[in-house]
Image: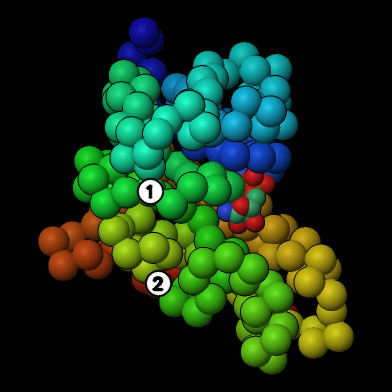
Amino acid sequence: MTDANALNRRFVVLISGQGSNLQQIVTEAQAGQWPLEVVRVISNRADAPGLAWAQAQGLPTAVVCHHDYDSRQDFDDALAKVIEKDRPDYVLLAGFMRILTAGFVAQFKSRLINIHPSLLPAFTGLNTHARALEAGVGWHGCTVHFVTESLDHGPIIAQAALAVDRSASVQTLAERVLRLEHMIYPRVVQWLAQGRVRLDESNQVHIQGVAQPHIWSQL
Ligand code: GRF
């Protein structure tokens, strides 16, 4: 391991599907030449297109398939074992479509990051874009946050917002929000890689050199 690598923070990325956020993060790090050490991409689905992409990039991968386990706890225990082997500083959930048990979250507390396609705490859970249109909100977007025991409610690191065109379809809105995700997640991962993000004892997020809460907006 070179000295530089010794300093690099180690990231495990969990995906379930396309892995577009994974791809954006890795591509931006390479283009921006900032140090990013993805030590493994893990999927709960063997057919996840993001896995093939990661393998083509030469990134280590693994599959821990939830169908192979009798319970959510057994799956989470197996997943945690695979993750810990890589000694990650951070575990990024990037389109990982599993609800994690409290024990798993506690084991990776303050190392576990997620991107959610809404402006939390609005629209936790699924189908966020349809629900945002149904609710007639003026603003919608995405949130990068630390994961805690309560689903989609962890300390917010950054948010990106856009003005909603109420005539838009769910698909159009989803595409616009995904583009915001591709802008915000790489920024946050770069801050994490630089060791600039801290979660204090009262669950407040501090990012060295960045005003909090970090927001972007797009009219
Ligand atoms: C994205 O909408 C993300 O917000 C959600 O999963 C979806 C797919 O993400 N968490 P990706 O393309 O697999 O990164």
Q: Earlier in the sequence, mark 1 or mark 2?
A: 1
Answer left or right for 91 relative to 126.
left
* Up/down of 58 relative to 88, above or below: above
Q: Please, which residue is most extreme toward the top here?
A: 1
Residue type at numbered disc 2 = Pro
Quick one: label 1, few (<14), some, or many (20+) residues within 10 Å? some
**x 59%, y 39%: residue:** 16
Q: Give the percent coordinates (x, y) of residue 55.
A: 65, 18
* Up/down of 50 relative to 72, above or below: above
Q: Please, which residue is most extreme toward the left here?
A: 201
**x 16%, y 67%: residue:** 202
The scheme the figure's colours follow is: rainbow
Query: In this figure, which residue is indicated by the disc labeled 1?
Result: 100
Visible residue check, residue 216: no
Answer left or right for 210 relative to 109.
right
Answer left or right for 138 relative to 146.
right
Seen from the viewer's position, the closer of residues 37 and 3 is 37
Location of residue 126 by image quarter = bottom right
Q: Give the percent coordinates (x, y) of residue 136.
A: 69, 91
**x 62%, y 14%: residue:** 58
Under circle 2, the secondary element is loop
Query: In this figure, which residue is indicated by the disc labeled 2?
Result: 213
Q: Give the percent coordinates (x, y) of residue 188.
A: 47, 52
Seen from the viewer's position, the closer of residues 120 and 81 is 81
Quick one: label 2, few (<14), some, or many (20+) residues within 10 Å? some
Under circle 1, the secondary element is loop
Number of numbered markers: 2
**x 30%, y 24%: residue:** 81
> Mark 1 or mark 2, which is nearer to you?
1
* Up/down of 12 relative to 152, above or below: above
Image quarter of the N terminus: top left
Location of residue 200 by image quarter = bottom left
